[in-house]
Structures are given as C-alpha cells and as structure tokens.
Amino acid sequence: MDEIEKETTRPACVEKPASRENPLGNRTDGGLPAHHALDALFLSEITETLGMPAGTPATLLGAGQNNLVYDVGGELVRLPRHATAENELEREARVLAVLKPLLPAPIPALRVCRSGQRVFSVHPRIQGEPLSTLRVLTDEQQRGLAADLGGFLRALHAVPAALLPDLAGALPSMEWDDLRSRCEALAFPLLAPRAVSRLRRAFDDFLAVCDALPRSVLHGDFGTGNILIHEGRLSGVIDFSGCDLGDEAYDYASLAAGLGDAFVDTMLNRFQMGEGFRDRMRFYRLTFPLLDILHGVEHGDRETLHAGVEAFSETNLL
C-alpha cells in the first residue's frame, strides 16, 4: 500500500498532539462521500489546474479538523478547510523544502497551487503505509524500526533553527499558559476534581522550567498515522504542519502515545537524555486528551470530546 495522509489539529501556539486518524470510507459514485459532494466542483477545477484529463477519479482518503485529503489521479491533494489551514499549508511547503535534503527518510515534496480563490497542495505518494500497531512486526523488525525512528528524530532535532525562519519560536511559557487558560475555561469543568487538581499541579511544575529548556526543530505530530513503513522499516514521514521549535521530548511523547513507553524506551536507551526528559514526556501526554476536549467543545465534535474526557478516567494517565 501507499501513503494515506490524514489530518489533526492543534490550538494556536501549541504543538499538535499525537495523531488521531479519522478516515472516511463510505463513498458514492466517483469516489466522493456524500457529505463532501460539494467539493466535487472544486476537485474538477483541480484536475484541470494539474493538467489531468476531465473525469479523473478523486477518492477521499482522510478528513480532519484542518484539511480534506484526496487521491486525485494518483497524486495526494490536500484541501484546507479554512483560511488558517491555507496559511499553514504554504508555511509547511517552505519548511519541507528545507528539511527534505537533511533527513534520512523520505518526506513529502509539497507543491502549493491555486485554483481561483482557493489553495490546495499536491505531492506524489510516498511508498509505505501508516504504522497502526507494532503487532504486525517481528521483534527484529521492531528493533530495526526503533533505530530508524530514533535516527530520524535525531537528524530532525539537529537541524539548525536558523535555516527555518518560518518557525516563530514564541516564548514557551506564553504558549503553554494560554493552553492552561483555555483548559481552565473549557476542559477542567468537565473533569473530576481530583484529575483537575493533578493537572493544575502538572502545569505549575512544567511552566516553572519550560522557558529554560533547549529548543529544537520538532515534527510536532510524530504519531503513528504520520509514520510510514514498508517491509518493517521506516519508509517515510508525513504531515509537517505542526513543525515548530520546542522540546525534543514532545516528539517522543507523541510516539509513545501510539506505540507505548516500552518501545520508545528502546529508542531513548540509545541516547543520553537530559534530566527530567521522561517527566516532560508524561506531561505532554497529559495535554493530548486536553486538546481533544478543547477541540470537541469549540467545534461541537462530541466524539472527540468524549474520547478526551474518558482518557482522564484511566488511572494510568494521571
């Protein structure tokens, strides 16, 4: 199989949480789900812009909070769902152009195009399929994949920030304090008092140190849906829309949320991580379901809201 891209979102100024895939499988004639049929006209304009024959089939591969992703004639086309997503798409294309020659695994060669007043991106598929579970891999393949992923993150985190002027690098405490304020208003009232008390203490501890942490170039959404494998090895990494400057522990936390702490420990044991690294990973993982709750409340997404609230009923999360 080839790459199937999907989208999640992040609140402004805070890195995206680990991927939560939301593919839509039901189709009507021509490959377009009924509830996205209004995009059919724009898709026909896209095929014309790309020089493809009229009637080129378009199949929805993923629908996220920021974008719709289609296979259009064998190319992956991303349609932003709002103006902010359009701006992020153009930013991501510039970032990918810098990163592509510096990383040990393929990443998208993103081309941003316009059709009328709307913006979309297109790029060729990358070989492989999203990593859904480690159970499909042998122990030897898991060790090899851990080495691949560790090498990819080490290379990414070593990229000089000066090469990427699009990464604003706002003061971390301002970003995370903003997230906490939104949680106080929208998320904490939905959680048990005991969970809220522990979350407030976790934010206090993190905010006391975050501005002093070294900052590296992050993927920002290094979850399983954005990691492609082929024959058990890393074959590509997609969706750099959350790429920003921040704490390296964030990318490892995103990976641990999907593949588990034991797998990520096999990666971390190869490197000398600084004091408090794993503690910060645990804090970041606490914020992922909070982001789900915020999105659910702000966008009326009951399923995502419920998943976020339920996460805090699990004893291992707090």
Image (cartoon, helix red, strand yellow):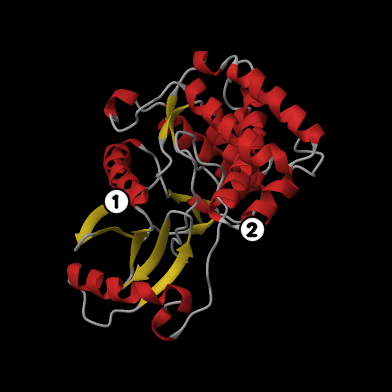
Compared with 183, 67 (above or below) is: below
Compared with 182, 280 (above or below) is: above
- At x 48%, y 53%, the residue is 228
Q: Nearer the viewer, residue 180 or 29?
A: 180
Q: Nearer the viewer, residue 192 or 216?
A: 192
Where on the picture, by quarter, is residue 281? top right
Q: Amino acid at mark 2?
A: Arg
In the rendered image, residue 98, in percent from the top left (x then y), is placed at 27, 37
- At x 67%, y 31%, the residue is 282
Label 2: state its secondary structure. helix
Q: Which quadrant does the C terminus fall into? A: top right
In whole angstroms, how far apart are the C-alphas of marks 1 and 2? Answer: 35 Å
Q: Amino acid at mark 1?
A: Ala
Compared with 311, 151 (above or below) is: above
Examine the rendering and report whether any part of residue 147 can be seen: yes
Q: Is residue 197 left or right of residue 203?
A: right
In the rendered image, residue 2, in percent from the top left (x then y), is placed at 44, 64
Label 1: state its secondary structure. loop
Which numbered tag is attached to residue 302?
Answer: 2
- At x 58%, y 30%, the residue is 181
- At x 53%, y 65%, the residue is 23
Residue position for label 1? 109
